[in-house]
Every structure is written in structure tokens, then in C-alpha cells.
């Protein structure tokens, strides 16, 4: 793996590249992100929490009197539906990242 020691020097030119990760100073860039098992577990739990909370909230919104005008959904329902879908999408993505990190993390 190669490390960029100093991405931009005072002249705006890229800094030197080295194989020694201890030589890094300032801002660095690497293609590898390392997540510990503890953080991976946190991400998985965060995703599970989203799937536990938001569907219950959806039921509460659905039953709320402000969600309906006769048989027609109101903007209250649409806004909350969008919020719920976005939150479940992000929660799922975070949980997937956590699962992938968990499988790749080195066991201590």
C-alpha cells in the first residue's frame, strides 16, 4: 500500500509518496478504511434500531387524525412517509456497512 505523505505542499504540488505508513504527516489519503469489531457492532445495532423504531412510528402516523382528510392522505402523512423511508434506507445502508466490517475485522 502506498501513502501520500503530504497531499498538497505550499506550492500546490502533490507531496512525496512512500510505503512507510509511519511517515504520514498532515492530511493523508488511503483507499483502505479500517473499522474495529466494536464500531462494526455499533453500526449493526444502529441499523437494527432503525428497523425497530421507524415501523412503529409509521403505524402511529398512519393512525393519526392529521394524516387523513376523509380518504385522502394529507401532506402530514406524505412528509412523514418520506422521512420514514429515508431513515430506513440510511439505517439499512449503515447496517450493511457494519456487517461487512464485522466480517472483515480481525478478531482480537
Image (tube, helix red, strand yellow):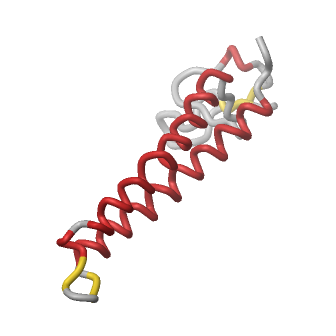
Q: Identify the image quadrant of residue 100.
A: top right
Task: Write the residue at 45% across / 56% down.
Answer: 55
Query: Which residue in the rendered view is the most extreme toward the top?
Result: 108
Task: Write the residue at 51% across / 49% down.
Answer: 51
Residues 83 and 100: in front is 83
Up/down of 41 relative to 85, above or below? above
Query: Which residue in the rendered view is the most extreme toward the bottom?
Result: 71
Q: Position of residue 106 (x, y in %)?
A: 79, 20
Residues 14 and 48: in front is 48
Task: Write the residue at 36% across / 62% down.
Answer: 83
Task: Write the residue at 70% across / 39% down.
Answer: 99
Q: Identify the image quadrant of residue 38.
A: top right
Q: Position of residue 2 (x, y in %)?
A: 78, 32
Q: Is residue 95 left or right of residue 87?
A: right
Up/down of 82 relative to 50, above or below? below
Q: Identify the image quadrant of residue 40.
A: top right
Residues 22 and 65: in front is 65
Q: Position of residue 41 (x, y in %)?
A: 62, 28
Image quadrant holding the C terminus, namely top right
Q: Position of residue 57 (x, y in %)?
A: 35, 55
Q: Is residue 8 left or right of residue 17?
A: left
Q: Is residue 76 left or right of residue 94?
A: left
Image quadrant holding the N terminus, namely top right
Q: Is residue 94 left or right of residue 78?
A: right
Residues 57 and 97: in front is 57
Q: How many marks?
A: 0
Amino acid at each position: 500500500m502506498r501513502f501520500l505523505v503530504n497531499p498538497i505542499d505550499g506550492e500546490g504540488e502533490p507531496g512525496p509518496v512512500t510505503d512507510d505508513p509511519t511517515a504520514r504527516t498532515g492530511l493523508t489519503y488511503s483507499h483502505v478504511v479500517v473499522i474495529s469489531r466494536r464500531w462494526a457492532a455499533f453500526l449493526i445495532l444502529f441499523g437494527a434500531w432503525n428497523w425497530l423504531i421507524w415501523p412503529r412510528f409509521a403505524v402511529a402516523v398512519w393512525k393519526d387524525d392529521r394524516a387523513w382528510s376523509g380518504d385522502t392522505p394529507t401532506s402530514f402523512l406524505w412528509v412523514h412517509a418520506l422521512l420514514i423511508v429515508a431513515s430506513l434506507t440510511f439505517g439499512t445502508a449503515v447496517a450493511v456497512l457494519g456487517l461487512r466490517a464485522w466480517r472483515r475485522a480481525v478478531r482480537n
